[in-house]
Each structure stands twice: as C-alpha cells, then as structure tokens.
Image (cartoon, rainbow, N blue to C red):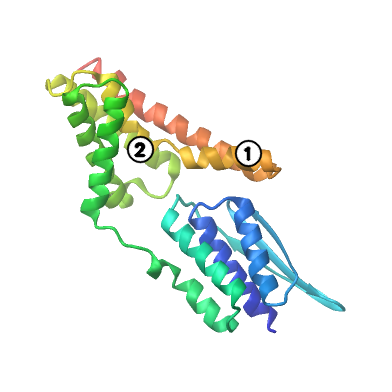
Amino acid sequence: MNDDKLLALGAELGRRLMSSGAEIYRVEESVIRLLRAYGAEPQVFAVPSCLFISLSAPDEPAVMRMCRIPAHGTDIELLEQCNCLCRELCRNPIPVEEAFEQVTHLEDRCRKHNPAVVLFGYWMTTAFFALFFGGTLPDCLSAGLCGLAVGLCALFGTRITGSNIFFRTTVHAALVSAFAFLLLRAGVAQNLEAVTIGSLMVLVPGVALTNAMREIMAGDIFSGLNRTAEVILVATAIALGTALPLILGQYI
C-alpha cells in the first residue's frame, strides 16, 4: 500500500482532531489505530502546534510527514465527527482514497448554526452567570447585552481582532468592561462586578485548562505546559482588557 497516501490520511485526520481541540492522547491514539487498521505500523508524536507521523517497513527507510497546526479553539461537533469516522474506518477499512475523501469533508457533517442562535447562546450564558454571581435582574439583562457585544465581535470582527489569541481576548475583555461601565453610568446595571464577571465567563478558557491538567497527569508534560502557557496568556489578556476601561473610566 502507498505510504504517502496513508501518511496523508493519518495527517488529515490528526489535523482535524487537533483543530477541534482534542486531547493529545486522543490524537495520537486515533491516528495509530486508523493506520494500523490499514496494516501499517506508525509512530505518532503530537504537540498542540504540530503533528509528526512516520511509517517504517523492514529493509526500507522510514517515511515521515509533519503537519503544522494553526491557532485553534474548541469544536465539540467536529471532534465527535472525527471520532465517529475513525471508529468506522477502523471497523471497516475502505480504500484509502475514499477514506481520505471522507476525512476532508468532515466539516460538511457538522451542523451549521445560524448566527442568531450563536448570539442567543452568548446572551443566555452571560445573563445566567450574572445571576449566578449575585446580580439582580437589571444586571442579568446588562450582562446579556455585553454577551451580545462579544458575540458580534467574535462572529463579525475577525478582520479587526485577527487570529492572535492575546490581542483578540484583550479586545473582547475591554469591550465587556467598557460596555458594563457605560450601562452602570446609564443606570441600567446596578452591580458592576456581577455584570463584568458574568460577561467575562464566555472568554475563560475552561476546556484548555482542563486538557492541560489532564495531559500533565497523563505524562504529556510538554503538551500540558504548552496549553498551560496558553491559558495563562488568555487570563492575562482578560485581566488587562478588563482593567483598562475601568481605569480610564475613573477620569471621565
């Protein structure tokens, strides 16, 4: 069987798993199981930003493929589709060309949510957390408005914020803080802390932190430290973005 095609298949599945926010052990194990189902004996090494796959055969030089993973978030829907397809291919290994075609069209299996539904999710989440942190009904509505602002920025402001996670998070946190402060000054909100904290919860990298701790405990130290550094960077961006409007607001 053509090693290049197998490497391309494994790299494509691994890249999509990592882009969906999958744990390192899941990426490595899924690619190994998939390639073994096609009769290969692979070696797989993954870190959050890169994937290495090599195949070797007796009396033949090993072949390897590296796949660079760009900055990404978490997509549970894509992760589930990757898992399902991997299991299907392990049970029933279809021709490599057909398998590669299915992997490249994994995004087509995912549900596409209407922007209005996504914005409603932002509104509901931030409003709930404002109540959770002791806010009143006006605080709940104010946090919902802040959540809508963040959602609009996340959906349609990519050209402004770019893909840099630190800058993007700083802008979003500053937007939340400034909007909450203005709502307080306007008399709409009553508790600035509840509105601000409730709105910022949509920016907290909870999945990344959980994966970081899990990978450190599983022995994937490098990957765990990499994710931990990312979490610290995001937390710093949230703190910086939140503080700037509040400091400037004292002089207005």
* Residue 127 horizontal side relative to residue 14, left or right: left
- Percent x, y for residue 145? 20, 35
- Percent x, y for residue 96? 59, 81
Where residue 77 sits, quadrant-wise, is: bottom left
For label 1, the SS is helix
Looking at the rendered image, the quarter that the C terminus falls into is top left
Which three-letter amino acid code belongs to the residue tagged 1? Leu
Q: Residues within 10 Å of mark 2 (few under 14, many from 20)?
A: some
Residue drawn at x 25%, y 21% as measured from the top left: 135
Q: Nearer the viewer, residue 143 or 150?
A: 143
Looking at the rendered image, the quarter that the N terminus falls into is bottom right
Whether pointer 1 and pointer 2 mark residues with C-beta atoms closer than 8 Å, the reply is no
Where residue 42 sits, quadrant-wise, is: bottom right
Q: Residues within 10 Å of mark 1 (few under 14, many from 20)?
A: some
- Percent x, y for residue 245? 29, 25
For label 2, the SS is helix
* Residue 133 horizontal side relative to residue 24, left or right: left
Q: Which residue is mark 2?
A: 202
Most extreme residue toward the top is: 250
Q: Nearer the viewer, residue 16 or 91?
A: 91
* Residue 152 horizontal side relative to residue 238, left or right: left
* Residue 29 horizontal side relative to residue 142, left or right: right
Q: Which residue is mark 1?
A: 225
Q: Is residue 47 visible?
A: no
Residue drawn at x 46%, y 36% as measured from the top left: 234
Q: Nearer the viewer, residue 187 or 244?
A: 187
Question: Mark number for residue 60?
Answer: none
Which of discs 1 and 2 lies nearer the camera? The answer is 2
